[in-house]
Image (cartoon, grey):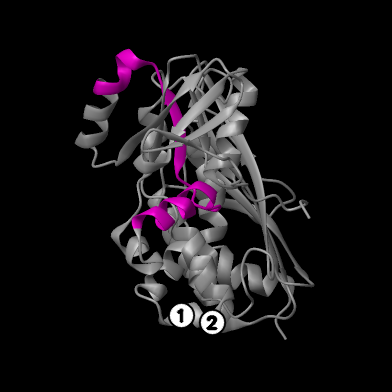
Amino acid sequence: MAGEFDLINKYFTHQQVTRSDVALSQGDDCALLVAPANTHIAVSTDSLIAGTHFLEHANPQWVGHKALASNISDLAAMGAEPAWVSMAITLPSPDDDWLEGFCKGFFELANAHDLQLIGGDTTRGPLGITLTVQGFVPQGKALLRSGAKVGDKVFVSGYLGDSHAGLEVILQPSKQQQPHASELERRHYCASSRVALGILLRGQASSCIDISDGLVSDIQHIMQGSNVGAKLHCDKLPVSSELIEFTQGKRIAQQYALKSGEEYELCFTLPSHLVESVHQAARQQNLMITEIGEITDSQRLSLFDNGQAIENEMLGFDHFRS
């Protein structure tokens, strides 16, 4: 049976990019890193646990992508550029097929972002992955949750709701026969990176957050951080054609978009005078953004559908909510 260092050498030591700002990586007690001048280091840690964030029989390549994508999304929400990542992985037993698939998904995404694995730990136990990712943002340019102002416009990136539909496919076998079920399951695990958008929004967006617990939940973090309210137009929520067919209607698809967690899209606010220039810059980079509401002085969240107020009973995900 392979030991800890055999696993590290076989699967994690030689499969990633090598950055010039890493003076010493794996193989010693600590990594030694060189931070660029006039930057802040953004740091985020997330865990994925089998049975909570993925099923043990899930495609390991997708699990590898999801594990890293969830951390990269936090960097994107701050306008940071990914640099380094460390990993602690717990395995019931060494499994070559699972590790090969996991590493393929993980390192494909890491290499796409010039992100180097600099160390970590492997242990025996219930299947779980914890990553700490670090990135750079110029001093004074980090995107925060606390800068939204009354009158700012609320935007989201990409499409919303696909991840929730994919989770339904995973948990409800009866939905595996619905249109686009397999593609929506893949999208649940394989979120697109929004790092380029986060960098574009530096000095433009007044606030930003990634959508990990659901739009209704996450917009309230901006509201609380900025001491403002928000008005969202549910009929403007961007939903994919695949989700509309899966739910058999755009209205239901937009309900999914309100509550869907683990989307890893960005929700951000823009002063009105910057809306057109940011739209143009996003189009030039083929980045999809959609205006869905505005910031208000009410200190409450209001939902509207085609101009009519609707009840806000849509809650995002909370690990500790009963």
247 or 67, nearer to the observer: 247
Q: Measured from the top left, where is residue 322 in percent x and y?
A: 78, 55
Viewport quadrant of the N terminus: bottom right
Residue 107 appears anywhere in the view: no
Magenta range: 250-276
* Contact, mark 1 vs mark 2 (Cβ under 8 Å): yes
> Given the image, on which type of amino acid does mark 2 rest?
Pro
Disc on res. 275:
none
Residue highlighted by disc 2: 173
Local crowd size for mark 2, using a 10 Å CA cut-off: few (<14), some (14–19), many (≥20): few
Question: Considering the numbered disc 2 on the image, is that residue within a helix, a strand or a loop?
Answer: helix
Question: Considering the numbered disc 1 on the image, is that residue within a helix, a strand or a loop?
Answer: helix
Point 41% across, 48% down: residue: 193
Q: Quadrant of residue 145?
A: top right
Residue highlighted by disc 1: 176
Looking at the image, is 295 positioned above or below residue 125? above
Q: Measured from the top left, where is residue 255 in percent x and y?
A: 47, 52
Residue 31 appears anywhere in the view: yes
> Given the image, on which type of amino acid does mark 1 rest?
Gln
Q: Quadrant of residue 235?
A: top left
Q: Measured from the top left, where is residue 150 in percent x and y?
A: 49, 14
Determine if the magenta segment contains residue 87: no
